[in-house]
Image: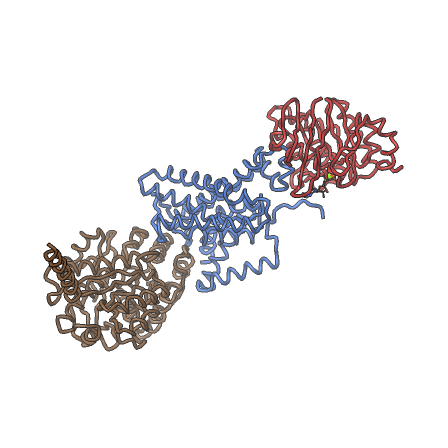
Chain colours: A blue, B red, C brown
Amino acid sequence: MLLQHLINGLSIGSIYALIAMGYNMVYGILELLNFAHGDVYAVGCFAALGLLTMGVHPALAIMAGIIVGFVINLFVEKLAYRPVRYSGRVTPTITAVGIAYIMRNAILKIWGPETFAFDIGVRGSNLQFGGIIIGTLQIYILLIAVSCMIGITLYLKKTKTGQGIIAISQSIPTAALMGVPVNRTISIVYGIGGALGVIGGILFCIYYDSIFIGIGFALGTIKAWMASIIGGVGSLKGAVMGAIMLGLMESMVSGYVSTLYKDAIVWLLLIAFVLIKPQGLFPAQVAEKI
Amino acid sequence: MIFSTQDLTVKYGQITALRDLSIILESGELTTLLGANGAGKTTLLKTISGLLKPTKGCITYQGVNIEGLQPDRIIKMGIAHCPEGRKALPRQTVYENLKMGAYIRNDSGVEKDIEYFFERFPRLAERRDQLAGHLSGGEQQMLVICRALMSKPKILLLDEPSMGLAPLVVKEVFEIIRQIHEEGTTILLVEQNAKMALKIADKGYILEVGKIVAVDDAQSLLKSKAVQESYLGG
Amino acid sequence: MNKRLAFLVMLIAVTLFGVSVASAADTIHFAVVGPMTGDSAGQGIQMKAGAQLAVDEINAKGGVNGKKMTFEVADDMATPNQAVIVAQKLSLDKKILFVVGHNNSSCSIAALPMWEKTGVPVISPSNTNPTLTRLGHKNYFRVVVNDDIMVNQVVKLAVKDLQVKKPALVWENSDYGKGMKDVALKALPALGVSLVGEESYVPGVDRDYSAIVTKFKGLGADGVLFLGDYTGAALLAKQAKNLNYKAKIVGASSIAHPKLIEIGGPAVEGVVSVTSFDPNDLRPKQAAFIKKYDSINKEKPGEWGAHAYDIVYLVKAAMEAGATDRASLIQKLQGGKSFDGVTGNIKFDKYGDVPDKKAFVITVKNGSFVSYKTK
Ligand SMILES: Nc1ncnc2c1ncn2[C@@H]1O[C@H](COP(=O)(O)OP(=O)(O)OP(=O)(O)O)[C@@H](O)[C@H]1O
Ligand SMILES: [Mg+2]
């Protein structure tokens, strides 16, 4: 059973990973906790749901959902973050929470709080190894998470815009003096963050065949934040590894301790983590000389 | 005249940092801007490169008004600003820093230019894949000057390139500046080290609390009694 | 001219006055109070629709003792605060003879003292919290089987009918789920079986049941008692199917909702549930009601619609037996005469509960709920 619990945890972790990556991208560049992240991608996922129920082909609906996530996050950046970019850290957090509320209530208004079936017609099959069952869907999700991580890492390392993003994350004025178009580049970061969130959110919906408002804040923002704390805030590798650790922790505690105290125990572990390793397992590269 | 400012006034909130400031840069000349701490030298460079917006006055470059434009537009027009305090990008490698300097370029010569700087500064070449944050102060200063040059600017704004460097390294840095000047780049050099700056400069401005109080060719300023007393240590 | 005008005015006044007097005396007023907005509005709207259908039928056949019935709707927003505000307002309205409501146990708990002050009979279609009828409110009745009775039937169904030998339990972490779990924990030993595993989940948040499934599988549990919401049950069934876990899933009425099948798809085939109303009941009386309700509301009634419908007829019967005002209505309801409604036989005990009311058992077959034959 141990192996089965490990595999379960790995699958949940890979989904958290995608969501956390988008979250950490935004954190990495501006060091702002993006409290609107979950609600942005929830809007993308619900847009995909809307198109699906209208009979649009699943691939198109998913693409559209990802684009919606990208575009909405552009607006969120422009409306909630840009005007207060240089006003410290508290103000943007407040504007973000505000815009998150607006989006959450918009979803509630249109769809309500219920859980809906999310069926795109992919049925994973099961691979059996002895008593252990691995869903092909679980394998795909892990592969998608890892390839997104590699893709984003290459994008940041190898493209001009990617290097501009990294430069902005170190100093906005210095990057501006190099000719990096600051507003546009920050927009792109938010867009990518939103799109990654929608990819994670949609995989979440596919994996559980259902969608509900909670995929945004409760399962998105909060889990992404927890994963980043474990893995290292602002680092992509940290987001992925932290998310997988979180998934494993949840499934191990549920499997071997108790589902009743699962959340309490996971939070306790998280606090312990913060105390022992405040920078996370894979802290963002810091190159200041000591 | 390639560049000029006219009656430039810049404020930080209520504080006026520059007041009706006018300077002229001649094409190919090295102009130095001297002044005490807090005189407004950095403010002027930041305003030229677009990081600050003037409240009044114009900046003219090649006959075009450029005040108020975004920094990425201004560097594309050919004005590179090498900021105060060795602003290397610490989390990127030496190579990546140089490449960032060519951010606005789309030509195929970028790699060749990087190699050129590596040849010229073997110490940077040796640390090619090292993070810039791990370089020594002098190495970082060299890197940021090279990085500014990677954009192939027509005008180079240098803000206290010798700050905090050992005398030998200062000499080295001034030698680089002299060479850039010889190659034909127009330079505006802000310096505390007035003597060395005036020695390689064609012209000098003296700034006091946001106002130009003197302008002359470098040789005359070097000999001027007032300048000697205030900036050259008697 | 002047005289004729004065006469006319007088005539109109008398007519109007007369009509209004007549309408007050010839009409029976009541109120439907439940969540009409917010998360559980669907349930309140069913209450309204059920009452409306009953009222329309009764009025078409000449009313109750020659009086027409009419009702007003009030929104308690499923929150105790709002429930008290509504009760404060409506209980002072002398016209209101009785109340159909509240939908949520927490609302009834908060508002009952207020209703009791002016003696308004409150008849709930859906409060299942066992303690509600033990608070000493003489004006309170409910036509729904409480959780105590319901869960005992779930346990019996699992052990006796489905022959579950090693049951495991999943409960939703809320007052509602915890109450049901406590009942089940007492009922199981009484039937001679002991629980092999017990897990909980947070309703509306937890989506992953794979750890629970893996654990139950390892413990060899052959049946899962699911005491929680339909979404949780559907997701558990799906993840059980994915992990090749074949235990029977048995639940209380909270899972007997069309959404169970919508979300669970093929995975919920064979899930069995005890419910207080079977939307596929084929007995003539029930089938006729379901068809009529469905054609008007474009949705089959759930327990909320059906119970509200029964409550109106229940009051009609009490009035035909002599009830005329709030106090006499309470007396008649307590009188213990049994009433045969679409949801079964309603006979209140001294607490206002319906201990003898039979619950139904339904199961999912070929993508819809069908009746399940119990032994
Ligand atoms: N961001 C700011 N906000 C408010 N005042 C500022 C700001 N930056 C500079 N100043 C003020 O503007 C004046 C000019 O500053 P500036 O940095 O241009 O001086 P400087 O000539 O470059 O001095 P130094 O030789 O010390 O570098 C100073 O009085 C300074 O305190
Ligand atoms: Mg300065």
Residue A25 visible, this orientation:
no
Q: Nearer the viewer, residue B63 or C78?
A: B63
Front residue of A132 and A231: A231
Residue B232 seen in the current view: yes
Q: Give the x, y percent position of residue A187.
A: 52, 38
Residue C228 percent location from the top left of the image: 35, 62
Quadrant of ligand 2: it is top right
Query: x, y (%) of residue A226?
Result: 52, 54
Left or right placement of residue A249 versus residue A113 in this view: right
Q: Nearer the viewer, residue C251 or A169?
A: A169
Horizontal arrangement in the rendering, residue C66 relative to residue C150 (left or right): left
**Number of numbered discs present?**
0
Rendered position, C344 above or below B37: below
Left or right: A96 as drawn, with respect to B1: left
> Looking at the figure, which quarter contains the C terminus of chain B?
top right
Which quarter shows the N terminus of chain B? top right
**The quarter of the displayed image where residue C250 is located:** bottom left
Q: Tell me where residue B120 appears, x and y as whole percent.
A: 75, 28
